[in-house]
Amino acid sequence: MTLFKHIVATAIMALTTMATWANETPFKFDCQPYLQNVTDTSATVVWATNLPAVSWVELAPDDGLHFYAEERPKFFDSLFGRKKTGCIHRITLTGLKPDTKYRYRIYSNEVFDKGERRVRYGRVEASDVYRGKPYEFRTTGAKKDAIHFAVVNDIHEHADRYRKLFHQVDSTTLDFMVLNGDMVNNMDTMPQLYNGFLNTSSEMFARSMPFYMVRGNHETRGKVQHNFIEMFPTSTGQPYYTFSRGPVFFIALDGGEDKPDSDIEYCGLADFDNYRTSQAQWLEQVVNSDDFRNATYRVVLIHVPPVGITWHGLAEVQNKFMPILNKAGIDLMISGHLHRHGYVAAGEQGLGFPLIINSNVEIMDIKANDDVMDIKVKDTEGRTTRSYQIGPGKRK
Protein backbone atom coordinates (compact mmCIF):
# COMPACT_ATOMS: atom_id res chain seq x y z
CA MET A 1 0.00 0.00 0.00
CA THR A 2 1.37 3.41 -0.97
CA LEU A 3 1.72 6.14 1.62
CA PHE A 4 -1.16 8.03 0.02
CA LYS A 5 -3.49 4.99 0.18
CA HIS A 6 -2.48 4.41 3.80
CA ILE A 7 -3.29 7.99 4.73
CA VAL A 8 -6.67 7.77 2.99
CA ALA A 9 -7.52 4.46 4.70
CA THR A 10 -6.56 5.86 8.09
CA ALA A 11 -8.66 8.97 7.50
CA ILE A 12 -11.67 6.88 6.47
CA MET A 13 -11.34 4.75 9.62
CA ALA A 14 -11.08 7.84 11.77
CA LEU A 15 -14.14 9.42 10.15
CA THR A 16 -16.08 6.17 10.53
CA THR A 17 -15.18 6.01 14.23
CA MET A 18 -16.16 9.65 14.75
CA ALA A 19 -19.48 9.05 13.00
CA THR A 20 -20.12 6.03 15.20
CA TRP A 21 -19.40 8.07 18.33
CA ALA A 22 -21.63 10.89 17.11
CA ASN A 23 -24.55 8.51 16.53
CA GLU A 24 -23.96 6.48 19.67
CA THR A 25 -26.78 6.45 22.24
CA PRO A 26 -25.54 8.03 25.47
CA PHE A 27 -25.50 5.57 28.38
CA LYS A 28 -27.58 6.94 31.26
CA PHE A 29 -29.93 6.25 34.12
CA ASP A 30 -33.47 6.09 32.74
CA CYS A 31 -35.00 5.60 36.16
CA GLN A 32 -33.50 7.11 39.29
CA PRO A 33 -33.16 4.90 42.39
CA TYR A 34 -35.99 4.14 44.77
CA LEU A 35 -36.27 2.00 47.89
CA GLN A 36 -38.38 -1.11 48.38
CA ASN A 37 -38.80 -3.60 51.21
CA VAL A 38 -36.86 -1.74 53.90
CA THR A 39 -36.75 -3.99 56.98
CA ASP A 40 -34.73 -4.26 60.20
CA THR A 41 -31.82 -5.95 58.41
CA SER A 42 -32.22 -5.34 54.67
CA ALA A 43 -33.29 -2.92 51.95
CA THR A 44 -33.74 -3.17 48.19
CA VAL A 45 -32.67 -0.45 45.75
CA VAL A 46 -34.18 -0.40 42.25
CA TRP A 47 -33.21 1.71 39.24
CA ALA A 48 -32.92 1.36 35.46
CA THR A 49 -30.51 2.19 32.66
CA ASN A 50 -31.35 2.79 29.01
CA LEU A 51 -28.84 0.11 27.86
CA PRO A 52 -27.83 -3.26 29.35
CA ALA A 53 -25.38 -3.04 32.22
CA VAL A 54 -24.00 -4.83 35.25
CA SER A 55 -24.79 -2.86 38.40
CA TRP A 56 -24.00 -2.66 42.07
CA VAL A 57 -24.56 -0.59 45.22
CA GLU A 58 -21.79 0.67 47.48
CA LEU A 59 -22.82 1.01 51.13
CA ALA A 60 -21.35 3.08 53.95
CA PRO A 61 -22.35 3.74 57.56
CA ASP A 62 -23.39 7.22 58.61
CA ASP A 63 -20.19 7.71 60.63
CA GLY A 64 -19.18 11.24 59.60
CA LEU A 65 -16.36 10.06 57.33
CA HIS A 66 -16.30 10.94 53.65
CA PHE A 67 -17.68 8.27 51.34
CA TYR A 68 -14.20 8.05 49.79
CA ALA A 69 -12.54 7.41 53.17
CA GLU A 70 -12.17 3.73 52.35
CA GLU A 71 -13.25 1.02 49.93
CA ARG A 72 -16.97 0.44 50.46
CA PRO A 73 -18.58 -3.01 50.31
CA LYS A 74 -20.33 -3.76 47.03
CA PHE A 75 -23.70 -5.50 46.63
CA PHE A 76 -24.50 -6.94 43.20
CA ASP A 77 -27.64 -7.99 41.39
CA SER A 78 -26.78 -11.66 40.97
CA LEU A 79 -28.60 -14.92 40.36
CA PHE A 80 -27.17 -18.30 41.36
CA GLY A 81 -23.67 -16.85 41.57
CA ARG A 82 -23.74 -14.93 38.28
CA LYS A 83 -24.02 -11.17 38.09
CA LYS A 84 -27.07 -10.20 36.07
CA THR A 85 -26.97 -7.85 33.11
CA GLY A 86 -29.94 -5.91 31.82
CA CYS A 87 -31.68 -2.56 32.03
CA ILE A 88 -33.60 -3.08 35.30
CA HIS A 89 -31.37 -3.26 38.36
CA ARG A 90 -32.73 -4.56 41.67
CA ILE A 91 -30.19 -5.01 44.44
CA THR A 92 -30.89 -6.11 48.00
CA LEU A 93 -28.60 -4.91 50.78
CA THR A 94 -28.36 -7.48 53.56
CA GLY A 95 -26.76 -7.87 56.98
CA LEU A 96 -27.86 -4.40 58.11
CA LYS A 97 -28.46 -3.27 61.69
CA PRO A 98 -31.95 -2.32 62.92
CA ASP A 99 -32.88 1.37 63.25
CA THR A 100 -29.60 2.45 61.66
CA LYS A 101 -28.89 5.13 59.08
CA TYR A 102 -26.85 4.16 56.01
CA ARG A 103 -25.42 5.99 53.00
CA TYR A 104 -25.20 4.51 49.52
CA ARG A 105 -24.45 5.15 45.88
CA ILE A 106 -25.41 3.26 42.74
CA TYR A 107 -23.15 2.11 39.90
CA SER A 108 -23.90 0.78 36.42
CA ASN A 109 -21.29 -0.38 33.92
CA GLU A 110 -22.55 -0.73 30.35
CA VAL A 111 -22.20 -4.19 28.78
CA PHE A 112 -22.40 -3.92 25.00
CA ASP A 113 -21.03 -7.29 24.01
CA LYS A 114 -21.33 -10.43 26.12
CA GLY A 115 -20.08 -13.76 24.92
CA GLU A 116 -19.45 -17.05 26.67
CA ARG A 117 -15.79 -16.27 27.42
CA ARG A 118 -15.53 -12.57 26.64
CA VAL A 119 -17.33 -9.44 27.84
CA ARG A 120 -16.83 -5.96 26.42
CA TYR A 121 -17.69 -3.22 28.87
CA GLY A 122 -18.61 0.34 27.95
CA ARG A 123 -19.27 3.46 29.92
CA VAL A 124 -19.94 3.84 33.65
CA GLU A 125 -22.66 5.84 35.37
CA ALA A 126 -22.73 6.40 39.12
CA SER A 127 -24.48 8.67 41.58
CA ASP A 128 -22.27 11.53 42.75
CA VAL A 129 -20.64 11.33 46.18
CA TYR A 130 -17.84 13.79 45.41
CA ARG A 131 -19.65 17.06 44.73
CA GLY A 132 -23.04 15.79 45.92
CA LYS A 133 -24.24 13.88 48.95
CA PRO A 134 -24.63 10.10 48.98
CA TYR A 135 -28.19 8.81 49.12
CA GLU A 136 -29.26 7.66 52.57
CA PHE A 137 -31.94 5.64 54.34
CA ARG A 138 -32.73 4.20 57.76
CA THR A 139 -33.65 0.61 58.50
CA THR A 140 -36.73 -0.14 60.56
CA GLY A 141 -36.22 -1.05 64.20
CA ALA A 142 -38.16 -2.08 67.24
CA LYS A 143 -41.92 -1.74 66.82
CA LYS A 144 -42.84 1.94 66.85
CA ASP A 145 -45.75 3.16 68.94
CA ALA A 146 -46.87 5.49 66.13
CA ILE A 147 -46.48 5.75 62.36
CA HIS A 148 -47.21 8.37 59.71
CA PHE A 149 -47.95 7.41 56.11
CA ALA A 150 -49.81 8.77 53.09
CA VAL A 151 -51.83 7.23 50.24
CA VAL A 152 -52.27 8.31 46.62
CA ASN A 153 -53.83 6.49 43.68
CA ASP A 154 -55.03 6.89 40.09
CA ILE A 155 -52.26 9.31 39.15
CA HIS A 156 -52.32 7.95 35.57
CA GLU A 157 -48.93 9.48 34.73
CA HIS A 158 -49.89 13.01 35.86
CA ALA A 159 -46.59 13.61 37.64
CA ASP A 160 -47.34 17.28 38.34
CA ARG A 161 -50.51 16.40 40.25
CA TYR A 162 -48.64 13.69 42.13
CA ARG A 163 -46.01 16.23 43.13
CA LYS A 164 -48.63 18.72 44.36
CA LEU A 165 -50.38 16.08 46.44
CA PHE A 166 -47.19 14.83 48.05
CA HIS A 167 -46.21 18.32 49.16
CA GLN A 168 -49.46 18.69 51.14
CA VAL A 169 -48.21 16.34 53.86
CA ASP A 170 -45.33 16.80 56.29
CA SER A 171 -42.71 14.65 54.59
CA THR A 172 -40.24 15.15 57.47
CA THR A 173 -42.28 12.77 59.65
CA LEU A 174 -43.47 10.31 56.97
CA ASP A 175 -42.44 6.69 57.43
CA PHE A 176 -43.56 5.50 53.98
CA MET A 177 -45.92 6.08 51.08
CA VAL A 178 -48.63 3.80 49.66
CA LEU A 179 -49.24 4.00 45.91
CA ASN A 180 -52.64 2.34 45.65
CA GLY A 181 -52.83 1.44 41.97
CA ASP A 182 -53.25 2.95 38.50
CA MET A 183 -50.19 5.13 38.75
CA VAL A 184 -49.88 4.66 34.96
CA ASN A 185 -52.40 4.36 32.12
CA ASN A 186 -50.93 0.97 31.21
CA MET A 187 -47.56 -0.75 31.11
CA ASP A 188 -46.83 -0.54 27.40
CA THR A 189 -43.29 0.82 27.82
CA MET A 190 -40.92 1.15 30.75
CA PRO A 191 -40.53 4.95 30.25
CA GLN A 192 -44.23 5.25 31.08
CA LEU A 193 -43.39 4.12 34.61
CA TYR A 194 -40.19 6.14 34.81
CA ASN A 195 -41.66 9.42 33.58
CA GLY A 196 -45.15 8.81 34.89
CA PHE A 197 -44.28 8.55 38.59
CA LEU A 198 -41.06 6.71 39.46
CA ASN A 199 -38.57 9.51 38.75
CA THR A 200 -40.88 11.94 40.52
CA SER A 201 -41.04 9.56 43.50
CA SER A 202 -37.25 9.26 43.57
CA GLU A 203 -36.80 13.00 43.43
CA MET A 204 -39.35 13.71 46.17
CA PHE A 205 -38.69 10.93 48.67
CA ALA A 206 -38.06 7.39 47.40
CA ARG A 207 -34.25 7.54 47.44
CA SER A 208 -34.43 7.67 51.22
CA MET A 209 -37.95 6.49 52.14
CA PRO A 210 -39.75 3.45 50.70
CA PHE A 211 -43.16 3.15 49.12
CA TYR A 212 -45.48 0.16 48.88
CA MET A 213 -46.98 -0.42 45.46
CA VAL A 214 -50.46 -1.92 45.08
CA ARG A 215 -51.27 -3.19 41.60
CA GLY A 216 -54.26 -1.54 39.96
CA ASN A 217 -56.17 -2.85 36.97
CA HIS A 218 -54.19 -0.57 34.64
CA GLU A 219 -50.90 -2.10 35.84
CA THR A 220 -52.15 -5.50 34.61
CA ARG A 221 -52.18 -4.17 31.03
CA GLY A 222 -49.50 -3.54 28.43
CA LYS A 223 -46.47 -5.10 26.79
CA VAL A 224 -44.21 -4.82 29.86
CA GLN A 225 -46.73 -5.70 32.59
CA HIS A 226 -44.64 -8.83 33.29
CA ASN A 227 -41.95 -6.52 34.71
CA PHE A 228 -44.23 -5.42 37.56
CA ILE A 229 -42.80 -7.72 40.23
CA GLU A 230 -39.23 -6.98 39.12
CA MET A 231 -39.85 -3.25 39.55
CA PHE A 232 -41.84 -3.64 42.78
CA PRO A 233 -40.47 -6.67 44.66
CA THR A 234 -42.50 -7.97 47.59
CA SER A 235 -42.02 -10.34 50.51
CA THR A 236 -44.13 -13.00 48.77
CA GLY A 237 -42.82 -12.61 45.23
CA GLN A 238 -46.43 -11.84 44.23
CA PRO A 239 -48.31 -8.54 43.73
CA TYR A 240 -50.24 -9.46 46.90
CA TYR A 241 -48.32 -9.35 50.18
CA THR A 242 -48.33 -8.15 53.79
CA PHE A 243 -46.19 -5.83 55.88
CA SER A 244 -46.24 -4.49 59.43
CA ARG A 245 -45.29 -0.98 60.46
CA GLY A 246 -45.85 0.31 63.98
CA PRO A 247 -49.24 -0.75 65.33
CA VAL A 248 -50.63 -1.57 61.86
CA PHE A 249 -50.68 -4.85 59.94
CA PHE A 250 -51.27 -4.22 56.22
CA ILE A 251 -52.65 -6.64 53.63
CA ALA A 252 -52.10 -5.54 50.02
CA LEU A 253 -54.46 -7.37 47.67
CA ASP A 254 -54.60 -7.57 43.88
CA GLY A 255 -58.09 -7.67 42.38
CA GLY A 256 -56.73 -8.27 38.88
CA GLU A 257 -58.75 -7.37 35.79
CA ASP A 258 -62.45 -6.53 35.77
CA LYS A 259 -63.83 -8.55 32.83
CA PRO A 260 -64.17 -12.34 32.36
CA ASP A 261 -60.93 -14.09 31.38
CA SER A 262 -62.49 -14.99 28.01
CA ASP A 263 -63.12 -11.35 27.06
CA ILE A 264 -61.81 -10.38 23.62
CA GLU A 265 -59.73 -7.59 25.18
CA TYR A 266 -57.37 -10.13 26.78
CA CYS A 267 -56.65 -12.06 23.56
CA GLY A 268 -56.82 -15.42 25.31
CA LEU A 269 -54.01 -14.59 27.76
CA ALA A 270 -55.97 -13.87 30.97
CA ASP A 271 -56.02 -16.31 33.90
CA PHE A 272 -57.24 -14.03 36.67
CA ASP A 273 -59.88 -16.37 38.07
CA ASN A 274 -57.28 -18.98 39.04
CA TYR A 275 -54.99 -16.19 40.25
CA ARG A 276 -57.66 -14.84 42.61
CA THR A 277 -58.41 -18.37 43.87
CA SER A 278 -54.74 -18.84 44.82
CA GLN A 279 -54.72 -15.40 46.41
CA ALA A 280 -57.76 -16.27 48.53
CA GLN A 281 -56.04 -19.43 49.78
CA TRP A 282 -53.04 -17.32 50.76
CA LEU A 283 -55.35 -14.77 52.46
CA GLU A 284 -56.86 -17.52 54.64
CA GLN A 285 -53.40 -18.24 56.00
CA VAL A 286 -52.65 -14.57 56.58
CA VAL A 287 -55.70 -13.86 58.74
CA ASN A 288 -54.87 -16.89 60.90
CA SER A 289 -51.28 -15.78 61.52
CA ASP A 290 -50.06 -14.50 64.89
CA ASP A 291 -48.78 -11.25 63.36
CA PHE A 292 -52.24 -10.49 62.01
CA ARG A 293 -54.08 -11.51 65.18
CA ASN A 294 -51.79 -9.54 67.49
CA ALA A 295 -51.85 -6.27 65.52
CA THR A 296 -53.55 -3.20 66.98
CA TYR A 297 -54.95 -2.28 63.55
CA ARG A 298 -55.59 -4.41 60.48
CA VAL A 299 -55.74 -2.46 57.22
CA VAL A 300 -56.49 -3.82 53.73
CA LEU A 301 -55.19 -2.06 50.61
CA ILE A 302 -56.90 -2.91 47.32
CA HIS A 303 -57.23 -0.72 44.26
CA VAL A 304 -60.76 -1.57 43.14
CA PRO A 305 -63.33 -1.21 45.96
CA PRO A 306 -65.50 -4.31 46.46
CA VAL A 307 -68.77 -2.37 46.19
CA GLY A 308 -70.90 -0.87 43.46
CA ILE A 309 -70.64 -2.27 39.95
CA THR A 310 -71.42 -5.91 39.20
CA TRP A 311 -68.64 -6.66 36.70
CA HIS A 312 -67.01 -10.08 36.79
CA GLY A 313 -63.72 -9.07 38.44
CA LEU A 314 -65.51 -7.30 41.28
CA ALA A 315 -67.86 -10.25 41.77
CA GLU A 316 -64.79 -12.47 42.06
CA VAL A 317 -63.33 -10.24 44.79
CA GLN A 318 -66.66 -10.18 46.60
CA ASN A 319 -67.08 -13.95 46.42
CA LYS A 320 -63.50 -15.00 47.14
CA PHE A 321 -62.00 -12.30 49.38
CA MET A 322 -64.88 -10.76 51.29
CA PRO A 323 -66.08 -13.87 53.20
CA ILE A 324 -62.55 -14.17 54.60
CA LEU A 325 -62.11 -10.48 55.41
CA ASN A 326 -65.58 -9.95 56.90
CA LYS A 327 -64.93 -12.45 59.67
CA ALA A 328 -61.28 -11.51 60.24
CA GLY A 329 -61.72 -8.29 62.22
CA ILE A 330 -60.50 -5.78 59.65
CA ASP A 331 -60.40 -2.17 60.90
CA LEU A 332 -60.22 -0.36 57.56
CA MET A 333 -60.04 -0.93 53.82
CA ILE A 334 -58.53 1.73 51.53
CA SER A 335 -59.30 1.73 47.80
CA GLY A 336 -59.25 4.02 44.75
CA HIS A 337 -60.29 3.37 41.15
CA LEU A 338 -63.46 5.50 41.03
CA HIS A 339 -61.64 8.88 40.73
CA ARG A 340 -63.96 10.29 43.39
CA HIS A 341 -64.08 10.12 47.16
CA GLY A 342 -66.38 7.64 48.85
CA TYR A 343 -67.05 6.22 52.28
CA VAL A 344 -68.92 3.04 53.19
CA ALA A 345 -69.61 2.38 56.86
CA ALA A 346 -69.23 -1.03 58.45
CA GLY A 347 -72.41 -3.05 57.96
CA GLU A 348 -73.29 -1.40 54.64
CA GLN A 349 -73.07 -2.93 51.14
CA GLY A 350 -71.91 -6.27 52.47
CA LEU A 351 -68.86 -4.91 54.32
CA GLY A 352 -68.00 -5.82 57.89
CA PHE A 353 -65.62 -2.87 58.21
CA PRO A 354 -65.36 0.75 57.00
CA LEU A 355 -64.12 1.47 53.48
CA ILE A 356 -62.56 4.74 52.35
CA ILE A 357 -62.27 5.29 48.59
CA ASN A 358 -59.65 7.92 47.83
CA SER A 359 -60.13 10.15 44.79
CA ASN A 360 -57.52 10.81 42.11
CA VAL A 361 -57.06 14.45 43.17
CA GLU A 362 -56.59 13.96 46.92
CA ILE A 363 -54.05 12.43 49.28
CA MET A 364 -54.80 10.55 52.49
CA ASP A 365 -52.59 11.73 55.37
CA ILE A 366 -52.72 9.06 58.08
CA LYS A 367 -51.23 8.90 61.58
CA ALA A 368 -51.77 5.83 63.73
CA ASN A 369 -50.92 5.13 67.36
CA ASP A 370 -52.27 2.68 69.92
CA ASP A 371 -55.23 4.96 70.69
CA VAL A 372 -56.47 6.18 67.32
CA MET A 373 -55.90 6.17 63.58
CA ASP A 374 -56.34 9.77 62.45
CA ILE A 375 -57.09 10.23 58.74
CA LYS A 376 -57.14 13.54 56.92
CA VAL A 377 -58.01 13.78 53.22
CA LYS A 378 -56.30 16.74 51.52
CA ASP A 379 -56.58 18.29 48.07
CA THR A 380 -53.81 19.70 45.88
CA GLU A 381 -53.98 23.04 47.73
CA GLY A 382 -53.55 21.45 51.14
CA ARG A 383 -57.14 21.94 52.25
CA THR A 384 -58.49 19.17 54.48
CA THR A 385 -61.66 18.06 52.74
CA ARG A 386 -62.61 15.20 55.07
CA SER A 387 -61.47 13.68 58.37
CA TYR A 388 -61.98 10.27 59.93
CA GLN A 389 -60.92 8.68 63.18
CA ILE A 390 -60.78 4.95 63.72
CA GLY A 391 -60.12 3.28 67.06
CA PRO A 392 -58.41 -0.08 67.49
CA GLY A 393 -60.79 -3.01 67.14
CA LYS A 394 -61.73 -5.30 69.98
CA ARG A 395 -59.91 -8.61 69.64
CA LYS A 396 -61.23 -11.92 70.84
Image: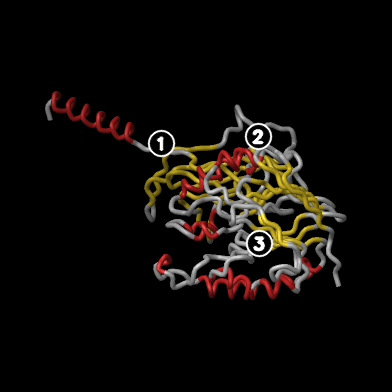
Quadrant including the C terminus:
bottom right
Q: Earlier in the sequence, mark 2 or mark 1?
A: 1
Q: Which residue does the numbered mark 1 point to in the structure image?
A: 26
For marks 1 and 3, the one nearer the N-term is 1
Instruction: Give the side of residue 336 with respect to residue 388, left or right.
Output: left
Where residue 13 appears, as percent x and y from the top left, is 23, 32
Q: Disc 1 to disc 3, how far (Cα)?
A: 39 Å
| Left or right of 374, for residue 255 | left
The quadrant holding residue 285 is: bottom right
The N terminus lies in which quarter of the figure? top left
Checking the image for residue 377, the label placed there is none
The location of residue 29, given as percent across then percent down, is 49, 40
Query: With respect to residue 165, does 338 lie above or below?
Result: below
Q: How is the image coloured?
A: secondary structure
Q: Nearer the viewer, mark 3 or mark 2?
A: 3
Residue named by callout 2: 67
Residue 240, located in which quarter of the rendered image? bottom right
Q: Secondary structure at mark 3?
A: strand
Tag 3: amino acid: Ala
Amino acid bearing label 1: Pro
Q: Please name the residue that numbered disc 3 is placed on.
A: 252
